[in-house]
Amino acid sequence: MTAKKKIILTDDDPGIQDAVRLIFERINYEVIVFTNGEPLLNDAFETPDLFILDKQLSGVDGLDICRYLKGRPQTAHVPILIISASMHIAKLARLAGAEAFVEKPFKMRAIRAVVERLLQTSESKKE
């Protein structure tokens, strides 16, 4: 039996938190939710298989968190998905080092497909 895939979601919107948790726990993923970026910037987490970061967080920008995680040897290999209501997120997410982005509002199927693609790509790099 394989271990559950672990996703860290950082988003301050309870509706997004619930939706993402529902989508991924239903397919046997473990979802850890942070309402702001402090735990990530203070290394107060176990390394997940994937990060989902909201661009617009209170206090610190999700893109800054992305750059921080990609700059650290412990987390540089972990795929990052940026979610945002901003129409210009594609370029910004790529510049920050994120592997993917999804515009809000998103369809459940769309975010699930992106996450599964990122995790499969990440797994194949390990082999």
Image: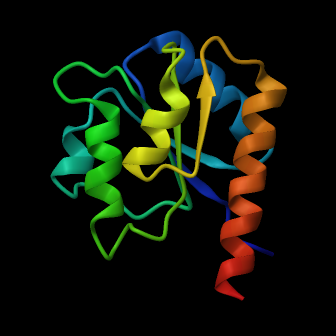
The correct choice, above or below, for 73 with respect to 6 in the image is: below
Residue 7, given in percent of the width and then of the height, sits at 55, 49
Front one among 112 and 85: 85
Residue 2, given in percent of the width and then of the height, sits at 76, 73
Q: Is residue 9 visible?
A: no
The correct choice, above or below, for 61 with respect to 15 in the image is: below
Residue 34 figure quarter: top left
Identify the colour scheme used.
rainbow
Front one among 41 and 98: 98
Quadrant position of the N terminus in the picture? bottom right
Quadrant position of the C terminus in the picture? bottom right
Judge left or right: residue 53 versus residue 101.
left
Judge left or right: residue 84 versus residue 40.
right
Which residue occupies 27% across, 48% down? 40
Which residue occupies 41% across, 64% down? 47
Which residue occupies 60% across, 15% down? 104
Front one among 18 and 11: 11
Residue 12, given in percent of the width and then of the height, sits at 37, 19
